[in-house]
Image (tube, helix red, strand yellow):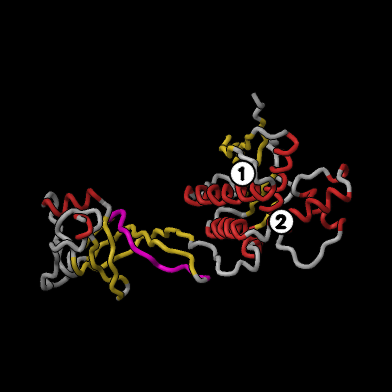
Amino acid sequence: MTKENTDFVTLYFDIPKDSTVNLATLGRSLIEFEKLAREVSTRTDPFTRFDLGFERTEEGSLRLITRLKDKISEAKLRELARIIVAALLLQPIVGILSEDAWRAILERAGYPQESMSSEEVNKIANELAVILQDETVKHSRNNLYTTLEADETIKAFGAKPDSSPGKPKTLVKREQFPSMGLPDTGDIEADPIPRTVTTNTTLILEKPVLRIASKAVWEFRMDGQKISAKITDTEFLDNALTGKVSIPLIEGLEMTVALEDHQEFKDGVWQHKSYTIVKVLNWTKPAYQPSLSFSDRSEDENDNN
C-alpha cells in the first residue's frame, strides 16, 4: 500500500489582543483558500489528489493550520505547500523580474533560497506566472482579500508552508488588501461580501403584522424615511401579540430597538440589503391618538409557500 504523506500550510490573521475574527470572515476565507489551493494543485500536477483538512488553531494572533495529505512524495507535497503560499501572497507582478528578485520573493514564501539552482528558480517562476493567470485562482484570491478587507479586526494576513510557531516571513498589511487583487480578470469580479452593522436606534411604528411569522416584515419610519424590518425578538412578539403586556401596536408607537443593517459590498460601496430587529429595548406610546394602521395580512405569504 502506498504511504500517505502529510504537509501543512499555516494561515495567520494578525488581530488586536483580546479581539476575535468574525465567524463569517473566517468561514469564507477558508472556502476561498481551499478553492485556490485545489486549483494550484491541479495546475501543478493534474493527477494530484489531496485532502485539505483543518488541523488546529493556536494562541495569540489567530493561526489556522491546514493539513495537506496525499499519496505523493513528501518532496512534491512540500513543493505544493510552498507554491500555494506563493500564489496566495505574491504581489501582482508588473513587468519582468530578475532572478534575484524572484529568489527574494520565493524565500519569503518559504523556499530555501540557498539551495535553489537558477534552473529551479526559473521553473518555479514560470509555474507561478501560469498559475496567477488562472481565472479560478484570480477569482478566489480576489474574494479572499475582499473578505479580509471587510473585517476591520484583521490588521494583516500571512501564510507559510509549515506548522512552525511564530509569524510568517511575509505579512500583507491591511492597507495592502485592496491592491492584492490580480488584474485582468475579465468579467470575473469578487463576489459580494456581506456584513451586518448593529445599532441601537428609535423607530416609529407605521404598520405591524399581527401574527408571528418568521418572514413577516413590519413597517416603520427611521429618521423620516420609511423602512421595513423583520422582528426576531420572540419575547416581544409573544408579549405584544398575546396581550401578556399592554403594548399598543398603533401608528406612532416609538420603539427603541437593536437594529441589524444587513449590507453587501458591491460596486465599491457598502449597499443596504435588509433590516432585522433583534431586540426591542423600550417603547413609548404616541403623544396623540393616531388612526389605526395595521396589518394582519401576510406580507409573509411566502411562509406558506
Q: Secondary structure at mark 1?
A: loop
Q: Is residue 304 above or below residue 163?
A: below
Residue picked out by circle 1: 61
Q: Amino acid at mark 1?
A: Ser
On the image, the x and y values in percent for residue 85 come to: 69, 48
Q: Secondary structure at mark 2?
A: loop
Q: Is residue 142 above or below residue 160?
A: below
- Tell me the tag on residue 275: none
Task: Name the residue rendered at 71%, 60% in the picture.
Answer: 91
Point out the stretch of residues depicted in magenta. Answer: 268-280
Q: Is residue 113 above or below residue 75?
A: below
Q: Is there CB contact under 8 Å for labels 1 and 2?
A: no
On the image, the x and y values in percent for residue 233 come to: 26, 52
On the image, the x and y values in percent for residue 133 come to: 67, 61
Q: Amino acid at mark 2?
A: Leu
The CA distance from mark 1 to mark 2 is 22 Å
Tell me the quadrant of the picture where the N terminus can be found: top right
Task: Name the residue rendered at 17%, 64% in the picture.
Answer: 285
Residue picked out by circle 2: 90
* Residue 13 visible in the picture: no
Instruction: Say whether residue 279 is magenta.
Output: yes
